[in-house]
Image (cartoon, rainbow, N blue to C red):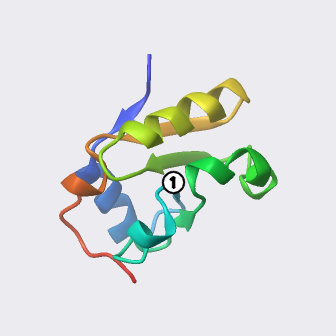
Amino acid sequence: MMKEIKPEEVAKKVKNNEDVSIIDVREDEEVAQGKIAGATHIPLGDLEDRLDEINQSKEHIMVCRSGGRSGKAYQFLEEKGYNVQNMTGGMLEWKDDVEK
């Protein structure tokens, strides 16, 4: 069962300055249009090569455009023993501020 989190819940964590790790797995040109403040950008295709950048003792929220690629990233990381959640609806459902 995939652990999911709604964009509104993620927005609340960001606004409350919670120590939350958000990983955006979209491509460069998508992220250039804006990402969630503080999110780490690791394109889905680079995930395997950049595992050392992902702290295994923290929980990570996976984000993409609509929730599909982040779901793949979620499954990949979960199999590797990471604690992850998938943000439902992706950036299409994100109503809050973005940083460019």
Quick check: 24 left or right of 48? left
Find the residue positioned furthest to the bottom: 100
Q: Is residue 69 above or below residue 20?
A: above
Residue 49: x percent and y percent?
Answer: 78, 50
> In screen coordinates, is 94 left or right of 49?
left
Q: Residues within 10 Å of mark 1 (few under 14, many from 20)?
A: many
Residue farthest toward the right in the current orientation of the protein? 52
* Residue linked to disc 1: 25
Near-viewer residue (65 or 84): 65
Q: From this viewpoint, is residue 5 visible?
A: yes
Residue sitting at 42 percent across and 51 percent down?
Answer: 63
Q: Position of residue 8 (x, y in %)?
A: 23, 53
Q: Secondary structure at mark 1?
A: loop
Residue 57 visible? The answer is no
78 relative to 58, above or below = above
Q: Is residue 79 left or right of residue 63?
A: right
Q: Residue 11, how many percent across, how many down?
A: 30, 61
Compared with 15, 49 (above or below) is: above
> Would you place residue 11 above or below residue 59 in this image?
below
Q: Residue at x 65, y 48 (%)?
A: 58
* Quarter of the figure with the N terminus: top left
Q: Give amino acid for label 1.
A: Val
Q: Please tell me which residue lies in front, 9 or 26.
A: 26
Near-viewer residue (30 or 81):
30
Q: Quadrant of residue 35?
A: bottom left
Residue 81, picture quadrant: top right
> In the picture provided, is 57 more to the left or to the right than 83?
right
